[in-house]
Image: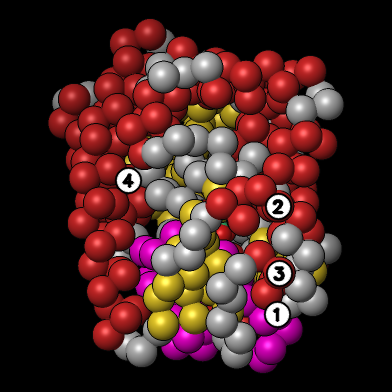
């Protein structure tokens, strides 16, 4: 509790300091959980540069990486009360705030990368982004975060049954919990920033993430087995507090949206490079990377789609995604 109070005080102080009375530059504070070497952070730096240029210096973006302002869940809560301007979270965490986002947690819902982008960049992606607004979160765009796969410390996973009894770290996300359970694993929610220590101390037997996050977090130092089963595609979502967004005039909102759209293109380009580099780097560091037949994984996790499909809202999005060519 004390920690949370201290966090709020710190953020309030930041707001005070960034209330720029001396000139007309408006500071946008953006908090996220990844390291500065990650393409997500670099995409945000690009967003800041673009915004500054487009707005003729009227806006500046200050980025707080590495969970400095809190976990993804806490950052969303700060946005909801207007104590933080922007954040980027995984769709896995966002689903706690905006129910339709759960559809991203359905294993193997996308056919391939091109299909994913057609959905995200089309009307379904827009509808899901717009759906967050009534929860005080203005969705601005999707950064690429590839697909997620399992990595383990001691035991290589070759087929879904190998996950039985293993404690697998997941995000604070019910769909991720249910996905791991569908394979017989024991899901353990832990925030990203606390995961290295949890792996090192053997609190969990493994985790799951995309290659850049696995590499840049250095989890590969502890986990020597990485199976590219690509069970979920959970985009990273960039959001702004509606308390801030609604104070902006139309021109200012356009500057922010345009700069963000440009940063999406840049981040996705950087992502592609980083995905390949990360896989090579972990292999060079002695990680055994394997490419399984995905059909037993997809078969076993079908129960997740069945369960979530009972909710008419999620079912409508599952159908829309499946019906997108
Ligand atoms: O949002 O917590 C996670 O596993 C996320 O993939 C990561 O922090 C990026």
Q: Earlier in the sequence, mark 2 or mark 4?
A: 4
Q: Residue at x 55, y 23 (%)?
A: 322
Disc 2 marks which residue? 300
258 is higher (above) or lower (below) than 260: above
Q: Which residues are magenta?
A: 201-224
Disc 1 marks which residue? 204
Q: Which quadrant does the N terminus fall into?
A: bottom right
Q: Residue at x 64, y 40 (%)?
A: 106
Mark 3–mark 4 Cα distance, whole angstroms, equals 39 Å
Disc 4 marks which residue? 44
Q: Earlier in the sequence, mark 3 or mark 4?
A: 4
- Residue 16 visible in the displayed image: no
Q: Where in the figure is residue 128, as x and y percent of width and height?
A: 57, 22
Mark 3–mark 2 Cα distance, whole angstroms, equals 9 Å
Kindly report which numbered mark, 3 or 4, lies closer to the viewer in this rendering. 3
Total tally of numbered discs in the picture? 4
112 is higher (above) or lower (below) than 287: above
Mark 1–mark 4 Cα distance, whole angstroms, equals 31 Å
* Tag 2 secondary structure: helix
301 or 100, nearer to the observer: 301
Q: Quadrant of residue 302?
A: top right
């Amino acid at each position: 509790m004390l920690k949370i109070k201290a966090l709020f005080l710190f953020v309030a102080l930041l707001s005070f300091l960034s209330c720029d009375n001396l000139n007309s530059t408006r500071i946008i504070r953006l908090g996220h959980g990844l390291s500065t070497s990650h393409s997500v952070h670099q995409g945000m730096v690009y967003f800041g540069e673009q915004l500054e240029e487009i707005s003729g210096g009227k806006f500046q973006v200050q980025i707080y990486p590495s969970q400095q302002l809190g976990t993804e869940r806490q950052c969303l809560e700060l946005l909801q009360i207007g104590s933080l301007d922007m954040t980027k979270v995984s769709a896995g965490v966002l689903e706690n705030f905006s129910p339709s986002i759960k559809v991203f947690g359905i294993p193997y819902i996308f056919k391939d990368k091109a299909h994913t982008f057609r959905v995200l960049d089309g009307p379904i992606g827009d509808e899901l982004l717009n759906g967050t607004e009534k929860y005080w979160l203005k969705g601005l765009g999707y950064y690429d975060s590839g697909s997620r796969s399992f990595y383990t410390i001691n035991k290589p996973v070759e087929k879904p049954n190998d996950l039985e009894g293993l404690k697998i770290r997941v995000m604070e996300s019910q769909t991720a919990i249910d996905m791991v359970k569908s394979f017989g694993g024991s899901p353990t929610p832990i925030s990203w920033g606390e995961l290295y220590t949890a792996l090192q101390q053997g609190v969990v037997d493994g985790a799951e993430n995309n290659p850049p996050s696995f590499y840049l977090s250095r989890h590969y130092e502890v986990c020597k087995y990485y199976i590219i089963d690509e069970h979920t595609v959970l985009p990273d979502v960039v959001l702004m507090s509606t308390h801030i967004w609604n104070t902006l005039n139309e021109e200012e909102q356009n500057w922010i949206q345009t700069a963000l759209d440009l940063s999406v293109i840049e981040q996705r380009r950087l992502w592609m490079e980083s995905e390949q580099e990360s896989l090579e780097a972990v292999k060079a560091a002695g990680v055994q990377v394997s490419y399984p037949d995905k059909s037993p994984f997809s078969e076993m996790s079908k129960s997740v789609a069945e369960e979530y499909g009972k909710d008419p809202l999620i079912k409508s999005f599952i159908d829309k995604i499946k019906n997108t060519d």
